């Protein structure tokens, strides 16, 4: 398991790693979940894009072997958009402070 | 410069994996992506371990860069094809970095790892062994690298382009949303900087938008003045630098690699909050 990098770089950390202990859930708005195919199987290696309320790109991560993704955002309305070899999918979500769980289903 | 002289397509890359004199280099911040599978024959460069000085916040110097490329088997005449994850952010940073040290024959793989993976093109785990070379770098080309004093002097005078997400620009987020938000620096942007998120220059699959779309996107840039692009640590702004210089052929464009992690920590400099550029 690689240590997530924070201040030094901008690459997305390992999406399956536990939340770093330094993350303060009183302050952070974590948007996390799993990308699934139509049959329900998790999709590894999917590209998940977080779009803001105007539809503008905010961040992108690649799902873990178990299909997990995680963003650190702010309270409000967001769109999750997943791209994969098995198709694409969207989910409109509303997040609050703390951990918010969602799933995104992709299809051709 | 043009798209043809700066980019290669995934199709071109797949046909030229074994072409002599062509070296594929994957550049990432987290090189576990390379270790898990990469384009056949590609070597890796680690954005941090290979390109940053281990002690000071700065780049490796000319001698260290020469030693790096020599040991990786890259020659002065090789055509270097850079690609990576994160929509080619770190590959674009390496492209700019190679140009900074005077390597002429360098290209970016359009779409990087993402398009390659979404196309289901092959990845391998074999690590190639390349014969070491004797690489000679040039002195850093300061005309493409901005420092903090250049940025402060540019406020209200030159084109400043903030390529972070709109929420980072406005000060609602302190870092890209895949990273924890607690950061040392202040939130906001450099006054008079125009917000053009790097992502507007790319399609969903990571390839660059068409020349016409890119020209429209940056039509606000006053070509009679120099331009500085910045982001948080200088890699997303390398992506924009690449578009402005290498695709659109603009002159006098610098990348500010100190970017917001430096500027947002400076004492006494002006900072603007909100969605508008603000006053000088």
Image (cartoon, helix red, strand yellow):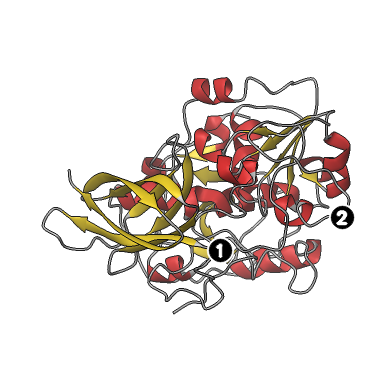
Q: How many labels does the image show?
A: 2
Q: Which residue is drawn at 61% across and 60% down?
A: B74
Q: Which residue is drawn at 58% across and 30% down?
A: B247
Q: Distance between the residues labelled 1 and 2?
A: 29 Å
Q: Position of residue A65 (x, y in %)?
A: 30, 69
Q: Is residue B216 above or below residue A52?
A: above
In the image, B48 versus A101, the foreground residue is: A101
Mark 2, Cα crowd under 10 Å, few <14 / some 14-19 / many 20+, is few
The answer for which chain carries disc 1 is B
- Assign the C terminus of chain B to one quadrant of the image: top right
In the image, B52 versus B256, the foreground residue is: B256
Q: Where is residue B32 in the image (x, y as percent from the top left)?
A: 46, 70
> Are labels 1 and 2 assigned to the same chain?
yes
Residue occupied by mark 1: B29
Tell me the element at label 1.
Answer: loop
Q: Where is residue A76 in the image (x, y as percent from the top left)?
A: 44, 47
- In front: mark 1 or mark 2? 2
Residue occupied by mark 2: B267
* Marks 1 and 2 in Cβ contact (< 8 Å): no
């Amino acid at each position: 398991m690689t240590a997530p990098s924070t201040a030094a770089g901008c690459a997305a950390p390992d999406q399956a790693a536990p939340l770093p202990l330094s993350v303060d859930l009183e302050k952070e708005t974590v948007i996390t979940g799993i990308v699934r195919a139509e049959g329900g199987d998790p999709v590894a290696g999917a590209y998940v894009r977080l779009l803001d309320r105007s539809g503008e790109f905010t961040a992108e991560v690649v799902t873990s072997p178990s299909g997990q993704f995680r963003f650190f955002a702010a309270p409000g309305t967001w769109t999750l958009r997943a791209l994969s070899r098995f198709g694409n999918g969207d989910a409109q979500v509303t997040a609050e402070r703390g951990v918010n769980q969602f799933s995104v289903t992709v299809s051709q | 410069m043009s798209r043809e002289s700066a980019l290669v397509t995934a199709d071109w890359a797949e046909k030229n994996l074994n072409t002599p004199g062509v070296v594929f280099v994957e550049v990432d911040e987290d090189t576990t992506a390379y270790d898990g599978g990469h384009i056949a024959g590609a070597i890796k460069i680690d954005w941090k371990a290979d390109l940053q000085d281990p002690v000071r916040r700065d780049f490796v110097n000319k001698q260290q860069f020469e030693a790096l490329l020599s040991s990786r088997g890259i020659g002065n005449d090789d055509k270097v094809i850079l690609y990576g994850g994160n929509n080619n952010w770190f590959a674009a940073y390496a492209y700019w970095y190679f140009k900074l040290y005077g390597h002429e024959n360098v290209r970016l793989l359009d779409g990087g790892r993402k398009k390659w993976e979404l196309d289901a093109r092959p990845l391998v785990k074999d690590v190639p062994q390349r014969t070491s070379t004797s690489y000679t770098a040039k002195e850093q080309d300061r005309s493409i690298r901005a420092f903090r004093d250049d940025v402060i002097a540019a406020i209200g005078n030159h084109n400043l382009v903030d390529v972070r997400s709109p929420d980072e620009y406005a000060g609602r987020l302190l870092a890209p949303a895949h990273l924890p938000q607690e950061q040392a620096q202040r939130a906001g942007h450099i006054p008079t900087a125009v917000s053009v998120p790097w992502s507007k220059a790319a399609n969903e699959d990571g390839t660059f938008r068409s020349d016409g779309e890119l020209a429209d996107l940056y039509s606000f840039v006053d070509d009679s003045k120099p331009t500085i692009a910045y982001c948080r640590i200088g890699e997303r702004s390398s992506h924009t630098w690449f578009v402005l210089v290498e695709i659109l052929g603009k002159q006098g464009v610098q990348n500010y690699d100190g970017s917001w992690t430096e500027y947002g920590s400076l004492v006494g400099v002006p900072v603007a909050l909100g969605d508008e550029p603000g006053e000088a």
